[in-house]
Image (cartoon, helix red, strand yellow):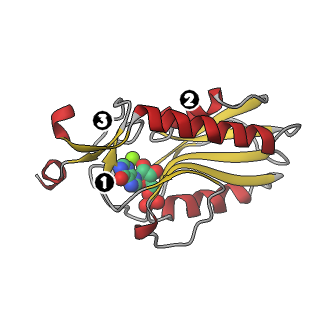
Amino acid sequence: MLEDIDRVLLTEEQIQKRVSELGAEISRDYAGKDLVLVCILKGALCFMADLSRNITIPVDMDFMAISSYGASTKSSGEVRILQDLDAPIANRHVLIVEDIVDSGLTLKYLVDNLSARRPASLKIATLLDKPARRLVPIATDYNGFQIPDEFVVGYGLDYAEKYRNLPFIGILKPEIYKK
Ligand code: IMP
Ligand code: MG
């Protein structure tokens, strides 16, 4: 698995430090509020696990699975819900926990879809942001790192379902997805 990585972009230590800062910020901002963390599966699984453990106020967790790229490195722009939330979010404070904003199409769809359920508030926490590739404007509220226009894997992010279990974020060797 490591032989497929060109170079490490964010080390485990860098990620953990930033995630703990975001957790502290979220704990302050939502103190006294009824907060639901909505993890977007599967990419945000590691971020959700670590972020939630750095939040010091009570939270509910829910999960949503949406269609991904499949074995491609570009968004099709077509988003489908594969698994919906367990519980209604009306009148609750909702924080979407996402791995990366690339074109922005996925988050645009999610924001439209979840807003229609009338939450008390709806915000976005994303670990990574690739601004160079944005097709639709998306305002994120909590942002871990801005990264260059490279295809990255690890810490939940995959290529063709692999590499999610790397503890760091690395740039995949282009020959892996150009094969
Ligand atoms: P968007 O709809 O183009 O913003 O893409 C968002 C989704 O695409 C993310 O939730 C990821 O699952 C996936 N994605 C985008 N860029 C990358 C990347 O560099 N590596 C792995 N997955 C990515
Ligand atoms: Mg993916």
Judging by the rendered image, the residue that carries numbered circle 3 is 163
Closer to the chain start, of discs 1 and 3, is: 1
Vertical placement of residue 53 versus 112, above or below: above
**Amino acid marked by disc 1:** Phe
Residue 94 disc label: none
Q: Are marks 3 and 2 in contact (CB under 8 Å)?
A: no
Residue at x-position 72% and y-position 59%: 115
Judging by the rendered image, the residue that carries numbered circle 1 is 151
**Residue found at the very far right of the displayed protein:** 32
Judging by the rendered image, the residue that carries numbered circle 2 is 49
Query: Which one is in front, 119 or 167?
Result: 167
Give SS at disc 3.
loop
Residue 73 percent coordinates (x, y): 29, 56
Give the CA distance from mark 2 to mark 1: 23 Å
**Amino acid marked by disc 2:** Ala
Query: Which one is in front, 29 or 153?
Result: 29
Residue 76 percent coordinates (x, y): 37, 63
